[in-house]
Image: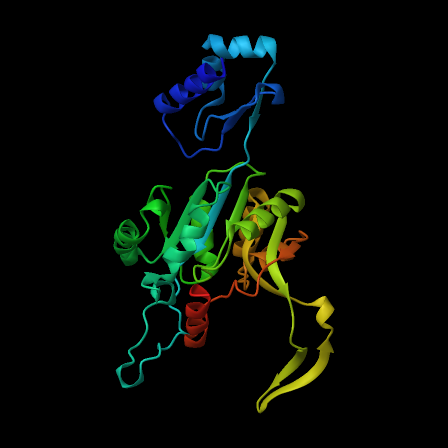
Amino acid sequence: MIAKAKAAANAIRRHEPISEIHDRLCCILPPQTGVSLRTGTGLKWRKLVAEFRRAVVFQQLAARNGYILFARMKVSVVIPAAGLGTRMASVPGGKTAKPAASKQFLELDGVPLLVHTLRQFAKSSEVNEIIVALRQPEIEPFRARLAKDAPEVLKRNPKFVEGGEHRQQSVANGLAAISASADDVVLVHDAVRPFVNETMIHEVIAAARKYGAAIAAVPAVDTVKQVERTADGALIKTTIPREKVVMAQTPQGFRYQILKKAFDEAAADGFVGTDEASLVERSGQQVAVVMGSARNIKITTPADLELAAFYMNH
């Protein structure tokens, strides 16, 4: 009976087209059946229910044990990768040093940073959709590079959208490419944080579902000073207690409706924030914090690249 149920579910999966809309369903059989069947993504609710009703094996299981249909929450991740990386002026190389490529395309262990980052999300079973914002001339060359270095990422059918003049516009363009319901989750992650891990991704998703908005962050270890800028430099105004400070990282996760509202309000007011959480805070939404990692570095300088090479090999 269970084998027939699995075969029926697989048959439905093979014959139904996969779309990018968010009506995703699961069929969970009670524990005594010893099996959990997932139909995958993109199946229409009415058509799936009709298929189940027509499948005798499911009717038999329903009569004997009962089953439950429920919609899965979609998780999309937006990777803004259209920046020029001006702080990465050059990479070490002595007299032969040349101006660096955009930092997301700098290589770590022979593979671009952006590819390393995408691999982490591609292997997460919780992520349904990956959107990458790039400068238009870089999209096709990068797609070819993915085919060479990370075909497993291409198997996830990532979407490529044109990035904007700054990060906020790139993320906005990524959001515009998402078809989501209000409570679906959107993650935003820096293209040059390749050491994010599945645990961190899971915890940010879980917190975003629970609280509506969440970021990964680490406690401040240095003493933090608030200063006033002057023509001659800066003057300390006060010392901020470290226990009240965290250092924000990514991924940052939000319910779709909350993030979309924050972006719409920022665009209407001409406000540009330093990260997505700053826009959501401005919109009046509280943002939860989950523990990040000291290894989850953002690679923006040649020194960061050297540290990343160390992490890669240790």
Residue 34 lies, in percent from the top left, at 57, 22
* Apparent side of residue 32 relative to residue 304 in the rendered image (left or right): right
| Residue nearest the observer in this picture, 104 or 149 | 149
What's the colour scheme?
Answer: rainbow
Visible in this render: residue 252? yes
Kindly identify the residue that appears in the image at 51 percent across and 12 percent down: 58
User: Compared to 245, does 168 lie above or below?
Assistant: above
* Apparent side of residue 26 relative to residue 111 in the rendered image (left or right): right
Number of marks in the image?
Answer: 0
User: Compared to 261, does 235 lie above or below?
Assistant: below
| Residue nearest the observer in this picture, 234 or 191 | 191
| Residue nearest the observer in this picture, 58 or 188 | 58
Kindly identify the residue that appears in the image at 54 percent across and 47 percent down: 260
Kindly identify the residue that appears in the image at 59 percent across and 8 percent down: 63
Residue 125 lies, in percent from the top left, at 48, 40
Residue 41 lies, in percent from the top left, at 45, 31
User: Compared to 64, does 266 lie above or below?
Assistant: below
User: Which residue lies most toward the bottom here?
Assistant: 232
Kindly identify the residue that appears in the image at 61 percent across and 13 percent down: 65
| Residue nearest the observer in this picture, 285 or 70 | 70
Q: Quadrant of residue 19?
A: top left
